[in-house]
Image (cartoon, helix red, strand yellow):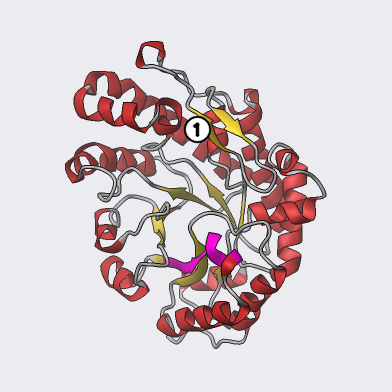
Amino acid sequence: MERIGALLTGNPLDRPPFTLTLSLYGARFAGCSCRVYYSDPEAYAEGQRGVVKLCSPDIVFSPFALPLEAAAYGAVLEFPEKGPPYLKKPAYKSSQAMTVPNPCNIDASPHLSFLVRAAEKVAADQKGTRPVAAPILAPTDLPILLLGMDTWLEMLLFKPDEAKPWVQFALDHFIKVAHAYATAGAAFLVTPVMLTNPALVNPELAQKILIPLLRDAFSQLRIPIVFHHGGNRLGQNIRLFKELPNLAGFVIDERDSLSEARQEIGPEMLLLGNINGPFMLYRNLEDIKQRTDSILKDRKGDPKFIFASTGADIPLETEEEKLITIRNTIAGSQGADR
């Protein structure tokens, strides 16, 4: 906590802070199946204790299992043996069957309750030592998991009157879950935002509807939020989002330039990245060390940089030595120049 606190207040650092997306990886240490790990808050917390013991990241995560939010409204999930739950079927089969739901009561939903209680347990474990980041489904993206991408885009583009109550529902759900995470002890939120990226949607739609929805949602937060690239390159599009309220910073894709991103967002905002997490399984130790060294060299003198894995979770099968190599390489580096 002292290292992240020093970064936020501008005090000298002994080394650059780092975090890795090891939400899934904790299942190695929990002594249970992934299905149990993503349904039992104590099992999840036990897994994160193992993560901390292994590589001591400066930030730990509550469950990175966004489809569980959609499952609270009837989305059908698949629970793989070695991964987090993923969407199997949207909640609604056709537009004729769609009724806008009311935001769930957190404690009445086993899926939402698990997410919040797991965050609470991890935050209690790490209190005073390291902050907890809570991944949360972006309000722009929740309807995709309930209606399907095509139906949601069709509504937004051609049926604005039908889309309006869904927008309000997604906003209300987001705020309810965000407030619950804040109460549980999360230090900040992380939201992978897919639908606002101009690589996926019409820029006019993003500017007129989707970014204003994010602005409305973020303005009501009680804790800061980090904008995650969501698997897409941000590039110069990062400038579209940098003025959002309560925004602490960005996690950018490995294919993006850290230097260019810093130029776009200015010196005060947090910048996190940029070694690909899912690809870690296929990298050898020397490549990982070289990539880590390269990132640290690129960001030397950047007092608001946090070394982080990008993309989704680091795979469960990734050798522990690879994570330890990152930790040791960063531990051997000098603090950020000021």
**Coordinates of residue 77 in the picture (x, y in percent):** 58, 32
The quadrant in which the C terminus is found is bottom left
> Quadrant location of residue 318?
bottom right
In the figure, 196 relative to 96: above or below?
A: below
Left or right of 297 in this view: 320: right
The reply to whether residue 277 is visible in this rendering is no
State the residue lying farthest toward the right: 31
Q: Is residue 105 magenta?
A: no
**Coordinates of residue 206 in the picture (x, y in percent):** 24, 42
Residue at 52%, 23% in the rendered image: 73
The reply to whether residue 279 is visible in this rendering is yes
In the figure, 225 relative to 50: above or below?
A: above
Q: Nearer the viewer, residue 75 or 109?
A: 75
> Quadrant location of residue 97?
top left
- Three-letter code, disc 1: Lys
> Quadrant location of residue 254?
bottom left
State the residue lying farthest toward the top: 96
**Coordinates of residue 308 in the picture (x, y in percent):** 52, 67
The local crowd at label 1, few if under 14, some if 14 to 19, many if 20 or more residues have their Cα within 10 Å, is some
**Coordinates of residue 216 in the picture (x, y in percent):** 32, 38
Q: How many tags in the picture? A: 1
Residue at 46%, 67% in the rendered image: 273
Instruction: Read off the magenta span.
Output: 271-281
Left or right of 169 in this view: 132: right
Q: Which residue is mark 1?
A: 176
Q: Secondary structure at mark 1?
A: helix
Left or right of 65 in this view: 190: left
State the residue lying farthest toward the left: 204
The quadrant in which the N terminus is found is bottom right
Residue at 58%, 67% in the rendered image: 282
